[in-house]
Amino acid sequence: QVSKDLAGVTKEQMADVVIAYEPVWAIGTGLVCDSEDANEVHKFIRTVLAKMYDDEVAQATRIQYGGSVTPESVDGLMAMSDIDGCLVGGASLFADKFARIVNFKHD
């Protein structure tokens, strides 16, 4: 899907691209993917980008996780090497939860 969606996007244009990954099974469920599993998918996406463009583009492209991020899951997700950020859904409707996510604890 990544290669299909980026068909026609130049190396130079990739500087403006942000990719979001959310497991299909997590959409609207409140379930979050295990941090390590999510990181493996992000690594795979970077491998695809490296094949399409080069390693520099693959490493520079921001890849965010978006599957039911919560105050309880954000620290583990953001500690992963290939997760560059999170897309916050329902938790953003509650100021205390959203504030905790925004102020995640980074190792």
Image (cartoon, rainbow, N blue to C red):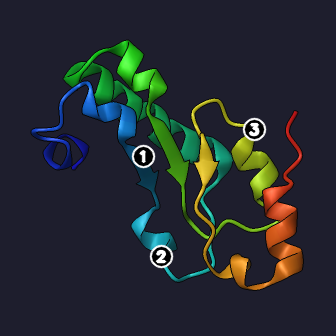
Label 2 to label 3: alpha-carbon separation: 22 Å
On screen, residue 91 versus residue 38, left or right, reads right
Residue at the image position 84 percent from the left and 74 percent from the top: 97
Q: What is the crowding at mark 3: few (fewer than 14 residues within 10 Å), some, or many (at least 20)? A: some
Disc ID at residue 18: 1
Q: Earlier in the sequence, mark 2 or mark 3?
A: 2
The answer to which of 5 and 12 lies nearer the viewer is 12
Q: Secondary structure at mark 2?
A: loop
Q: Please, what is the three-letter code of the amino acid marked with disc 3? A: Ala
Circle 2 crowding by C-alpha within 10 Å: few under 14, some 14–19, many from 20: some
Residue located at (80% from left, 61% from top): 101
**Which structural element holds mark 1?**
strand
In the rendered image, the quadrant that contains the C terminus is: top right
Q: Are marks 2 and 1 in contact (CB under 8 Å)?
A: no
Question: Please, is residue 79 above or below residue 100 in the view?
Answer: above
Q: How many marks?
A: 3
| SS assignment at label 3 | loop
Name the kind of residue labelled 1 in the image: Val
Q: Position of residue 73 (x, y in %)?
A: 76, 59
Q: Name the disc covering residue 27, or none.
A: 2
